[in-house]
Image (tube, rainbow, N blue to C red):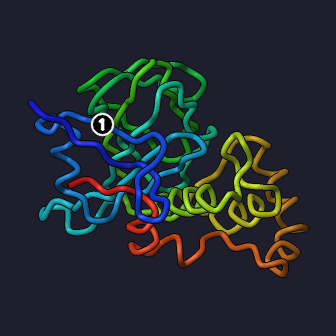
Amino acid sequence: MGTITFGRRLVEGRPTGPGVTVDADGPTAALLAERSSPVISNPVVGEWAVALREPEVDDGASDRGLGIYSAGNTGPPEHFHPDNTERFEVVEGTFVFTVEGEDRELATGDEITVDPRTAHTFRNETDSFAVCLVELRPPGAVGDVLATLAGLAHDGKLTRSGRPRPLQGIVMAADLANDTVFTSPPPPIQRATASLLAPIARRAGYRATYPEYLEDVFWEARVEQPP
């Protein structure tokens, strides 16, 4: 049984830094064969993601993607989706999901469905990679958000903890409030802050997403792709 390695940062076309190595005949490699986009990476926090083809029977009713998280990854800030149901299936490794304040450990093969307006997050507390399949129904802006944060990471525009800088974060929170809402600070405070500062941030050139980070060519030039 062989392995495949991908996800390393490309510098002048040469892979460097940490990447992902998986069994060539394993479940992660099988899902990567269904990818409909390049693999993107966030080198600040050690995350990789890729969009997957939709099943023909789905008829575009959901977004489907694969997330790969490095050892000790703390996952996204707690958040909820006002109108979307999110289903997670662990492909490899172990995650701890926190849903409405309650922790639940999920191992390979386990699934969890998070209803709209339900606060949740997850993390990888192990010393190895963990991989999960994610489905969002109906489709939303999560993929664009992940690509934007990853692109900002590649361009050195995130904090050391992987968070957007204040004005960048305010514009993202304001423009994506109908798709993803973070629970801290409390949403009413976020809305009040955004109403005051988001116009200033936009005039300074900040955007919720940037076209270059949503283009395949950006990622093909910066991240080692699976064979």
| Residue 209 x/y as whole percent | 60, 71
**Res 174 → quadrant:** bottom right
Residue placed at 70% from the left, 53% from the top?
158
Residue placed at 51% from the left, 28% from the top?
123
Residue 78 in the figure: left or right of residue 91: right
Q: In front here: 28 or 21?
A: 21
Q: In front here: 30 or 227?
A: 227
Residue 103 in the figure: left or right of residue 29: right
| Residue 129 x/y as whole percent | 39, 29
Residue placed at 33% from the left, 24% from the top?
93
Considering every residue shown, the one lying at the far bottom of the view is 203
User: In this figure, which residue is indicated by the disc labeled 1?
Assistant: 21
**Res 104 → quadrant:** top left
Q: Residues within 10 Å of mark 1 (few under 14, many from 20)?
A: some
Please tell me how many numbered marks the rendered image carries: 1
Residue placed at 67% from the left, 69% from the top?
175
Q: Secondary structure at mark 1?
A: strand
Q: Quadrant of the C terminus?
A: bottom left
| Residue 136 x/y as whole percent | 38, 53
Q: Quadrant of the N terminus?
A: top left
**Res 203 → quadrant:** bottom right
| Residue 50 x/y as whole percent | 35, 55
Q: Is residue 98 above or below residue 197?
A: above
Please, what is the three-letter code of the amino acid marked with disc 1?
Answer: Thr
Q: Is residue 190 above or below residue 108?
A: below
Q: In front here: 115 or 41?
A: 41
Residue 129 in the figure: left or right of residue 183: left
